[in-house]
Amino acid sequence: MKTKLKILKLFLGIAVFIFLVSFSAKRHACKPVADVLIEIDHSSENRFVNDELVRNLLDGKDLRVSSTPLGNLNIRKIEKSLNQNPFVKKSEVFKDVDGNLSVKINQKTPIMRVNTGVEEYYLSDELTKIPLSNLYSAQVLLAGGPIKKSDFSGLKALSEAISADKLLKKHIIAVKKVEPNSFNLFVNKGNYIIEFGELRDFDEKFEKLILFYDQYLDKVGLNYYSKINLKYKNQIVATKRKNDEN
């Protein structure tokens, strides 16, 4: 008899515990969001996204997070909506036991600012277009001319090659498409153009250019030549500036 009574008490205790947990969970689910905790990855130095922008997205007509009970929040829907923002690379959203909604944002990384004459945008490291922002202007390589989607991969490789070398990064600030398969590079000091040609053979071409800087330009000055041609294999052709161009 005592054994049966103990078993009965045990079952009653379990039942009461389940009821209390269920009741607490229901009360918790009916509460509004206590706070929205936003964490934005600024490791890439980009500032396209800020807290205000994220909060505006969360309280927009599609989500209405602040007026939705905690238990009715659709986390997948919130993440999907945030990921549709052109500046957001990836978002992570989760609820905690204190009733807070935590939002982590990774921004897209621009590698180049492109102006085709028809449209202007940033090119991301994922080869997608990022619109210009009223919040932030990225300090990246400039690109102009009739640039097409088929050029994106080559432009990324060019950007990576320039960024990897201190000397190139110091001098080269822009690239322009001048023919269907030919590009020129522009510098921030000196009135000369670098005729790069096709977007390939980066190591070979830039190795020649760096050597040319070390052996010639440092001695004669940045305005001695009007053009430096890297198109030809195993050689570099420099055009001396005419007297009337000085």
Image (cartoon, rainbow, N blue to C red):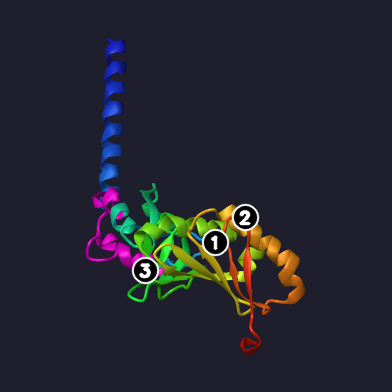
Tell me the mark number nearer the camera, choosing from 1 and 3: 1
**Quarter of the figure with the N terminus:** top left
Assess whether residue 74 is covered by the magenta stretch.
yes
- Give the farthest residue toward the bottom: 244
3D distance between C-alphas at marks 1 and 2: 9 Å
Q: Main secondary structure of the magenta part?
A: helix
Question: Where is mark 2, residue-wise?
Answer: 234
Q: Tell which circle, 3 or 2, labels the residue nearer the N-terminal end.
A: 3
Q: Is the residue under label 2 in contact with that under label 1 (CB below 8 Å)?
A: no
Occupied quadrant, residue 54: bottom left
The segment highlighted magenta reads 52-78
Q: Residue at x 74, y 65 (%)?
A: 214
- Three-letter amino acid code at disc 3? Pro
Badge 3 crowding class, 10 Å Cα cut-off, few under 14, some 14 to 19, many 20 or more, is some
Occupied quadrant, residue 24: top left
| Disc 2 secondary structure class | loop
Q: Tell which circle, 1 or 3, labels the residue nearer the N-terminal end.
A: 3
In this picture, residue 77 sits left or right of residue 106: left
Q: Residue at x 33, y 68 (%)?
A: 56
Q: Residue at x 62, y 55 (%)?
A: 234
Q: Which mark is residue 231?
A: 1
Q: Could you tell me residue 228's position as x and y percent?
A: 60, 69
Q: Which mark is residue 131?
A: 3
Badge 1 crowding class, 10 Å Cα cut-off, few under 14, some 14 to 19, many 20 or more, is some
Badge 2 crowding class, 10 Å Cα cut-off, few under 14, some 14 to 19, many 20 or more, is few
Say how many tags the image has.
Answer: 3
Occupied quadrant, residue 133: bottom left
Tell me the mark number nearer the camera, choosing from 3 and 2: 2
> Against 135, is 149 above or below?
above
Residue 171 showing in the rendered view: yes
Q: Which mark is residue 43?
A: none
